[in-house]
């Protein structure tokens, strides 16, 4: 088990006890990300697990043993009961989770279903690179009602530039084969959507049109993980705005894009569904292949040990992590933001941006997002488009 590292904020200076005495209470976890396999059959050049600061994957079991997932299932079920949750979501992740094999995933999902409290819903999602999708895996997912998210970065050429195998071969042909299988009529309802890490050096409209070919019910557009110590090479605003206009101007909604829909909802005073924007509490916890309980794994992009909590499913329940400063910081809304962000009229929309993108050593995470200018430009553009259609809309932008 890795030893928790500490930064000034939130680890040393966020007073969780004072928050509790003031009436704050944590939001229980709703999502459990289970790292069922620690390795991957691709070598994406931007991967936060393998190419960035935290390299703890090297010291962990390659595949999660059954006794570990059984204990995780017990902890998850107990968390649902303790907080009287109507349901929770289990996200099978990696590495590449399909490296665990269809039979092992079938056994794992069966065990989680058996452990989960009667009358409480367990939704299961798997996030895969799509290269190993085959009939055996799809039949397991169909049998268990598992929804499948696939990572794809646009056109074949763009995808193969960044998402390659270790020997340099591209992955797009195998992803295309897997997606065609997954989206066949007999498997209707299994496809959850596409996850695309944007590359601002590519053609944004070509990327979007390539993703639309698979008729995804949803697309998640992710900014490449970066921070003030490792800043991005390019600005992303123009890329995002071009895709937003194409999506917004379509005569009918072709797909859901969570980032854009969240910004629109927030401009109108609503809430968000993701970590990228808004101030909604983050309610996700990660279990690694050795049973360690960790914070969101995107923090691996910041520094070694940034995800560590010092807890494991063998000795601790999930409630033991709810008071961790790294969890609390992502649940207290504007109180977690730096003065620069709180003084900005956009802060209730951008929410300070993705938590991992705020990191700067040695102080920690109380900074604006390294993508602050990009988020501001996107939000203002969305506001202008909505205001023109609605005759004035929402928060100042």
Image (spheres, rainbow, N blue to C red):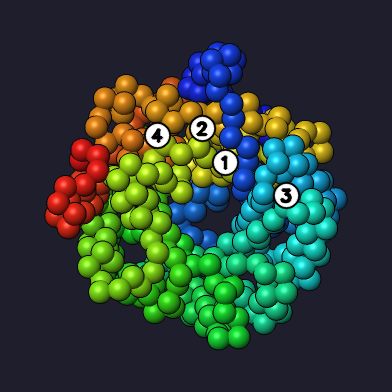
Task: Locate residue 22, reporting x and y percent.
Answer: 54, 15
**Vertical side of 314 occupied by 288: above or below:** below
Q: Do the residues labelled 3 and 4 touch (CB within 8 Å)?
A: no
Residue 283's disc is 1
Residue drawn 46% across and 62% down?
A: 195
Which part of the image, by quadrant, shows the C terminus? top left
Task: Give the Cα distance between marks 3 and 4.
Answer: 27 Å
User: Residue drawn 30% across and 45% down?
Assistant: 268
The Cα atoms of the two marked residues, 2 and 3, are separated by: 26 Å
Q: Do the residues labelled 1 and 2 touch (CB within 8 Å)?
A: yes
Q: Is residue 149 left or right of residue 319?
A: left
Residue drawn at point x = 46 percent, y = 39 percent? 280
Task: Answer with mark 3 or mark 4, whichever residue precedes in sequence.
Answer: 3
User: Which element carries disc 1, helix, strand or loop?
Assistant: loop
In terms of sequence position, does the residue under pointer 1 or pointer 2 come before the other? 1
Residue 371 location, x and y as percent? Answer: 31, 42
Above or below: residue 190 compared with residue 340 = below
Residue 83 seen anywhere in this rendered image of the structure: yes
Asked whether 82 or 220 is in front, the reply is 82
Helix, strand or loop for disc 4: helix
Q: Which tag, 4 or 1, sits closer to the chain's start?
A: 1
Residue 358's disc number: 4
Label 3, on which residue? 289
Report crowding for label 4: few under 14, some 14 to 19, many 20 or more residues within 10 A (C-alpha).
many
Furthest-bottom residue in this view: 185
Mark with earlier residue (2, 3): 3
Q: Which residue is drawn at 66% across and 31% down?
A: 321
Where does the image place residue 58, in percent across and percent down from the top left?
66, 47
Q: Name the residue under label 2.
A: 331
């Amino acid at each position: 088990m890795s030893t928790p590292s500490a930064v000034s904020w939130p680890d040393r200076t966020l007073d969780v006890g004072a928050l509790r005495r003031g009436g704050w209470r944590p939001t229980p976890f709703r999502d459990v990300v289970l790292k069922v396999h620690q390795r991957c059959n691709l070598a994406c050049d931007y991967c936060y697990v393998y190419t960035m600061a935290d390299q703890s994957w090297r010291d962990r079991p390659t595949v999660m043993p059954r006794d570990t997932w059984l204990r995780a299932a017990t902890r998850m079920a107990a968390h649902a009961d303790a907080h009287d949750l109507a349901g929770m979501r289990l996200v099978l992740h990696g590495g590449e989770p399909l490296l665990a094999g269809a039979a092992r995933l079938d056994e794992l999902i069966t065990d989680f279903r058996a452990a989960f409290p009667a009358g409480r819903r367990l939704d299961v999602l798997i996030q895969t690179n799509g290269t190993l999708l085959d009939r055996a895996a799809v039949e397991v997912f169909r049998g268990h009602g598992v929804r499948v998210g696939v990572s794809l970065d646009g056109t074949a050429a763009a995808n193969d530039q960044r998402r390659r195998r270790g020997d340099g071969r591209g992955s797009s042909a195998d992803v295309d084969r897997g997606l065609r299988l997954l989206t066949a009529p007999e498997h209707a309802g299994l496809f959850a959507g596409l996850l695309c890490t944007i590359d601002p050096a590519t053609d944004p409209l070509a990327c979007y049109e390539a993703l639309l070919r698979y008729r995804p019910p949803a697309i998640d557009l992710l900014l490449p993980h970066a921070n003030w110590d490792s800043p991005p090479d390019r600005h992303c605003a123009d890329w995002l705005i071009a895709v937003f206009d194409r999506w917004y101007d379509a005569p009918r909604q072709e797909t859901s894009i969570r980032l854009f829909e969240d910004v629109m909802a927030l401009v109108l005073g609503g809430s968000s569904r993701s970590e990228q924007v808004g101030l909604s509490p983050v309610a996700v916890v990660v279990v690694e292949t050795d049973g360690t309980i960790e914070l969101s794994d995107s923090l691996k992009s910041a520094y070694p040990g940034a995800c560590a909590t010092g807890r494991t499913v063998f000795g601790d329940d999930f409630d033991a992590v709810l008071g961790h400063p790294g969890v609390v910081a992502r649940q207290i809304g504007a109180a977690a933001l730096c003065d620069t962000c709180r003084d900005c009229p956009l802060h209730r929309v951008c929410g300070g941006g993705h938590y991992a993108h705020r990191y700067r050593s040695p102080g920690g995470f109380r900074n604006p997002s390294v993508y602050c200018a990009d988020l501001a430009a996107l939000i203002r553009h969305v506001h202008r488009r909505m205001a023109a259609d609605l005759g004035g809309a929402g928060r100042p932008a």
